[in-house]
Amino acid sequence: MSPLLEVSDVSIRFPAGNRIAAQLSGQPDFIEAVSGVSFALEPQKTYALVGESGSGKTTLARSIIGLVPLHQGRITFAGETISNLSESRLRRVRRDIAMIFQDPVGSLSPRLKVRSILAEPFKVHGETAELERKIARLLADVGLPPHFAERYPHQLSGGQARRVSVARALALRPKLVIADEPTAGLDVSIQGDVLNLMHDLQARYGTAFLMITHNLNVVRHVAERMAVMYLGRIVEEGRTAAIFKTPRHRYTTALLSANLKPDPDAASQIIEAEGETPSLIKRPSGCEFHPRCSFRLPVCIERAPAEQRTAADHRFSCHNPA
Amino acid sequence: MSGNLLDISGLSVAFRTKRGPLKALRNVSLGVGKGEIVGIIGESGCGKSTLINSIIGLLPANAEKPSGHIRFADEEIVGMPEARLQQLRGERITTIFQDPMTALNPVLSIGTQMTAIQYRRTGSTAEKRRRAIEFLEKVRMPDARSRLDQYPHQFSGGMRQRICIAMALLTEPDLLIADEPTTALDATLEVQVIRLIRELQRDIGCSVLFISHHLGAVAELCERVAIMYAGEVVEHGPVRDIFRDPRHPYTRKLLECDPGRVLEPLARLPTIGGELPDLVRLPQGCIFEGRCPDRFARCRERPPVETVRPGHEAACYKARELVNP
């Protein structure tokens, strides 16, 4: 099957805060938030981008719907190039790609009732026929009673606000939904509800999901494939089951081992990544994970590792893999 | 229990609302021994924040006067005059909050904030700065001396939380309250923060009340744990007993729901059906009755607190029967 979304060698740069100071001190006057990222997402599947805050996940997601321009690379969607399109042509693309933003309550306008929030996508795309019926159906789809149409966002719980966000994203039956930390800040019991809802809607409408998260426990259950990002690069990519079973990159192994288990006796196995994430302004030489890596070799400081591929469609960039 | 640093017994707190009193905490009892790390696990609306605010005497204006007791180092906090509370707060009881960005003042340098909170100490500003550097080094801040004059936005999320920890420990408190301190951090940084709290707790010898909804973090750090649901402590005991042999149906469901426990990929994740009870119109019987998979007729009457084994108690009729297969 040809991929629904293909991201090829994408880099995204932002101007540095103080360009004159940067030039005087000989540092580059830009920050590269995403560097040479490639991956492909199949239709009707869920793909997870994993990484800590600042690893470029959200920037990459925003570039897909055209909110951030690319410095380099190409994004194709359903066989068509969508990177660096004009605003009017982007609007058509955004009908097929919806986004669920991070903050469940903050991403809903506080002064609009749920009814108006859900009506908005239809109005933007001029599909206002039978609006009331469409809103009622959306609420039913996400398991909310019809009278919730009259509520304001502050009258919703975190889980209910999430459901409204999901309903809004699915309003126009997009082919792809980008979900940025869809369960961050939710309790575990409600997290399961929201993920199950997304799973059901995927089964019913064939929606593909690009899920951005730092919660590994969630990824294991929802995504067929995943990419691990560090400082704007994909350091490991492959089938979720394969990465959980045999992680190769040392950042991935650190991340998986640091995933604390709800078991008081499981404490002894933690391999800790040392120190803090370096700043994008001063990227380390060689492999960018080397200052934190417990397995670094002299070569890791000198040159960046090339990407290796295993037979099982699993790639990673590490000089001293697990 | 005597000898505890913090002893909460029969604590109830209600808020005035238009619909009537909202009973946010009901008959909560909890002890924290000297040098002990106690975890509180609970989901939104369980009363964790109300409990913390009661301990530090910062309940919002619509709170009614709490009933019950909060004894801290043999002093009663319930009804304590504000002046005395202010002496305890920020000196002997300190708090780390969830969001390290909003906990710090964005327009003052770290150094200014870290010297300002030492206002009770005698000594010159230079001495206070030295002490600030010493504590930044304790939380493993590289180049602590030069970074003292930087502002919060110049630090990463993990670093900001370390600064908050350094500030909370500067006064060498007797009790550190950590309110979801790792929620905003990724897994590798979360482990670091947890290790840091444990190391510094040993170093300073303070007690820690660690509030989290991350079960893994509590399992890693705490010796004892209390599970809260809808304003009550439904189960408490040593962390190993609670995680290995939970006896309250809510605890059992909560552990079941944690995707970290389910290692085989599932298409559908387990959830707890139903919703939190209305805390204005409380149910007559067990607070979890409406959502409980193990309920039976008697659950319409308030269940007793059953002792499962010494130190492990659960508020459920079936606490002695519900054993893991």
Image (cartoon, coloured by chain):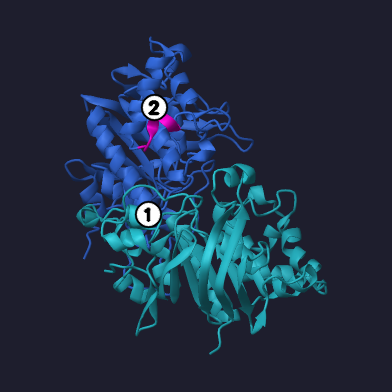
Chain colours: A cyan, B blue
Span of residues in magenta: B141-147
Image spot of residue A231 (x, y percent): 46, 58
Does B219 appear above or below B29? below
Residue most extreme to the bottom: A1
Q: Residue at 20% across / 40% down in the picture? A: B311
Q: Name which quarter of the figure residue A226 lies in.
A: bottom left
Q: Is residue A93 magenta?
A: no
Residue A144 visible? The answer is no
Element marked by disc 1? helix
Question: What residue is shown with label 1?
Answer: B187
User: Front-most of B315 and B258?
Assistant: B258
Does B86 appear above or below A314? above
Camera-near label (1 vs 2) is 1
- Characterize the local packing of mark 2: few (<14), some (14-19) or many (20 or more) Cα atoms within 10 angstroms: many
Question: What residue is shown with label 2?
Answer: B94
Image spot of residue B105 (x, y percent): 54, 30
Amino acid at dot 2: Thr
Does B84 appear above or below A304? above
Q: Are marks 1 and 2 in contact (CB under 8 Å)?
A: no
Element marked by disc 2? strand
